[in-house]
Amino acid sequence: MTDWEPFVYGSTLSITDYEPAGFDVELSEWVNSAALDVETHNVSGWLYDPNVPITVTLSGFDNDAFIASDNTWLMLEILNWDEDRYADYELPFTGNGTYTFTSDNMSYDEEYPLDGTEVTYVSFCVYDKDVSDDAHINPGTSGRVTIAFGTPEEETVVPEPATAAYALMGLGSLAGIKRRIRK
């Protein structure tokens, strides 16, 4: 997914792609607020599978970046533009963090499901349901949005080598004690 751009033509929102699949957002401090509503028609190599979660991570946004109510949601729309097949996802918005979209928070057209179809379009927005419009970001705001497939991996803690050596020495001591008791 590359070539992200504002959904609204003429938006003052600056969008810059970054690898592997995401974009940086910036709004100059000299302009009015703008909707965080972006899209891309440049999607390749993605056959949609509703069983594979999609994670969206927002980072770097200030706590007061968004002009929104408590009824604000993240919305992700995935389509095959040519076949008019889609899957829409929604999750409550709580600020910076990782959101995992699954089939539990998805809607789609049952007559024309997207399953196994090539994805050709993706849109993402922060939506304020109280005003039925996109949530806006304040002037001077910047942040990053990353889109990935699958659930985020939990960090595996690998013990330091000294810790492992102490554990082995402890097991060795126990084996020696067991031999003494048998004699």
Image: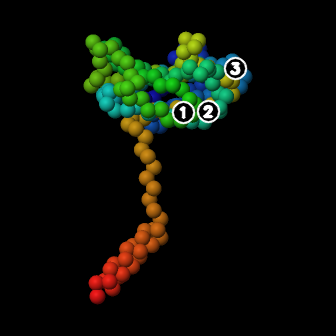
Q: Residue 68, position in %: x, y?
A: 62, 20
Q: Which residue is mark 3?
A: 31
Secondary structure of the residue carrying tag 1 is strand
Amino acid at pointer 2: Phe
Report the Cα–Cα distance between label 2 and label 1. 7 Å
Residue 58 has which mark?
A: 1
How many angstroms separate mark 2 from mark 3 (CA)? 17 Å
| 61 shown above or below 171 | above
Res 16 → quadrant = top right
Residue 82 in the image, given as x and y percentages of width and height: 33, 14
Toward the viewer: 112 or 38? 112
* Image height of 33 relative to 160, above or below: above
Name which residue lies at 56% across and 29% down. 94
As helix, strand or loop, the secondary structure at mark 2 comes to loop
Residue nearest the viewer, comparing 11 with 113:
113
Cβ–Cβ below 8 Å for labels 2 and 3?
no
> Pointer 3: residues within 10 angstroms few (<14), some, or many (20+)?
few
Using the rendered view, name the quadrant where residue 139 is placed. Answer: top right
Q: Position of residue 169 (x, y in %)?
A: 41, 76
The residue depicted at 65 percent of the width and 31 percent of the height is: 63
Badge 2 vs badge 1, beta-carbon distance below 8 Å: yes
| Residue beneath the point at 60% across and 36% down | 60
> How many marks do you count on the picture?
3
> Which tag is nearer the camera, tag 3 or tag 1?
1
Quadrant assignment for the N terminus: top left
- The one nearer the camera, 67 or 175, is 175
Residue 74 numbered mark, or none: none
> Mark 2 sits on what residue?
61
* Sequence-earlier tag: 2 or 3: 3
